[in-house]
Amino acid sequence: MRTEHAGENLAALGPRHWARVEGWGMAVSALGYLHQPESIDELRALFALARESATPVTLRGGGRSYGDAAIGEGCLVADVSRMNRILSWDKETGIVETEPGVTIEQLWKRIIPDGWWPSVVSGTMFTTMAGCAAMNIHGKNNYRAGTFGDNVLEFDLLLPNGDIVTCNREQNADLFHGAIGGFGMLGCFTRLKLKAKKVHSGFLRVEAFNTRSIPHMIEEFEERVEDADYLVGWIDCIAGGRGLGRGTVHSANYLPPGEDPNPRESQVLSVQELPNAIMGVPKSLMWWPLSYFTNNLGMRAINTAKYHAGNIIPRGAMHLQAHAAFAFLLDYVPNWKWSYRPTGLIQYQSFIPAETAAGAFEKLLRLSQKAGLPSYLGVFKKHRPDPFLMTHALDGYSLALDFRVTPRNRAALWNLCHRMDDVVLDAGGRFYFAKDATLRPHVVEQYIPADNLRAFIELKHRCDPHGLLQTDLSRRLFGEQFA
Ligand SMILES: Cc1cc2nc3c(=O)[nH]c(=O)nc-3n(C[C@H](O)[C@H](O)[C@H](O)COP(=O)(O)OP(=O)(O)OC[C@H]3O[C@@H](n4cnc5c(N)ncnc54)[C@H](O)[C@@H]3O)c2cc1C
């Protein structure tokens, strides 16, 4: 077997072992030969070994992709999380250079005391710079700040043949626009240079208010789009009938210069750190009581309580919230995904043009409710287009739906996702590999513009002619096209 041969040769490399590696949602996993290189030389050696033994390589960062984007059955898994040094930080210009495994947590903690914040962050701080670039992640400010890639100035990419190529908007521009959002298929990021956002306080001014329906939420987003720095909606995906699509909007703004009399004090880490306990319960234990509610009845109760609590807040009431607390709400309960044990969850995030978004998202909610498989968490965001080949970003909205997976519902859930794909395609929508576990090749061929797909496959053949870089997601969706 090819991988056994690789195993013998790998003895010469650093720490490694066979491991069952999971997608973050725990619903999919693969047995891979896990290696955690600490330097570019070790990465190069790994690629050389992969070439000699014709063993595919799966690149992995923080492992926060929900599905099979960072796992590969029988692959050498190159986990870059130990290549995690911040190489340079310029507090005058806000330009930072990092190794690939630097996390968003490391980055914000390094730069906020100097009055800067990462331009784009995910809802969790445990993603890496490489993982964020490879998926071209978006934040709650996508409609204003663009995607992660829009804020990358330059990167170095280690190709499977061992060469390192520097890419930016002038030099190797085609590779720049392909590797960002290229889901680890063209090469391995070894250095990234990014631009951060200047802030004048450690706090944001936040307003929260309820909305009756998805069209109402869109109306409220559109009213604020010129002024709000961040907009995000929570949707109660269990409520039906007249409550269909009801939810809560959170809108946030940076404080202008001078408004915070002591920015140095609000920017210190102790103000930003998330609390260790919630109502006296250590956060590390919170997933356990939560697990009693991770079912249709429990989530209906939680959603109803949350929505009605939102009605109590007077309209227009503002409060100050630390950047980290607003950005990383999902990190408040560490390992909350364990409440979905033993078989985990998947997320289905679709992106739909503004004109068709409301109707299509309502159809998705109805379909899932009718199937008896309502989503337990729905998150709504606004987006804008970007220039990356395989991008999910468009001029419109996205709805991310979390679904519990059980041995009994698995087939029905996958079937539901396939029916939802048709609604999204009919509405001119797109999907996102970071969240995917269920897409099929013909859907990808329909939503990615043909020219972009052709250009990406050409880049794949040029950068990785032997198809060394693979994941279970790339095999599922692109198979022979990448070989
Ligand atoms: C709780 C939670 C909240 C989230 N919120 C958001 C959100 O708000 N917005 C959003 O856009 N996403 C969000 N995500 C998804 C997450 O941001 C992406 O999946 C991101 O890619 C994860 O980064 P990672 O470092 O964990 O990468 P991984 O998941 O390990 O890998 C992601 C991709 O990067 C590739 N890769 C890894 N290292 C390299 C490298 N060195 N060079 C080239 N390719 C590489 C992998 O092959 C894989 O295809 C969220 C995820 C979770 C779990």
Image: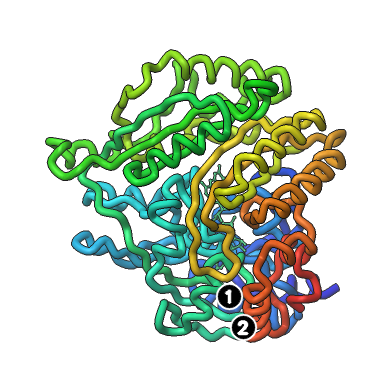
The quadrant in which the N terminus is found is: bottom right
In the displayed structure, does residue 118 sit left or right of residue 64?
left
Residue ID for mark 2: 463
Is the residue indicated by label 1 positioned so its CB lies within 8 Å of ligand 1? yes
> Could you say whether the residue bearing mark 1 is in a helix, strand or loop?
loop
Q: Position of residue 233 (x, y in %)?
A: 50, 35
Q: What residue type is labelled 2?
A: Cys
Can residue 1 be seen in this snapshot? yes
Which residue carries the number 1 mark? Answer: 187
* Neighbour tally class for label 1: few under 14, some 14-19, many 20 plus, Cα within 10 Å: many
Along the viewing direction, whichever of 443 and 38 lies nearer the viewer:
443
User: Is label 1 in contact with label 2 (beta carbons under 8 Å)?
Assistant: yes
Across and down, in percent, residue 396 comes to 54, 50
Q: Position of residue 206 (x, y in %)?
A: 34, 32
Q: Is residue 342 visible to the viewer in this orientation of the structure?
A: no
Of helix, strand and loop, which one carries label 2? helix
Q: In screen coordinates, is 421 left or right of 213?
A: right
**First of labels 1, 2 by sequence position:** 1
* CA gap, disc 1 and disc 2: 7 Å
Ligand 1 neighbours mark 2 (CB distance < 8 Å): no
Compared with 127, 191 (above or below) is below
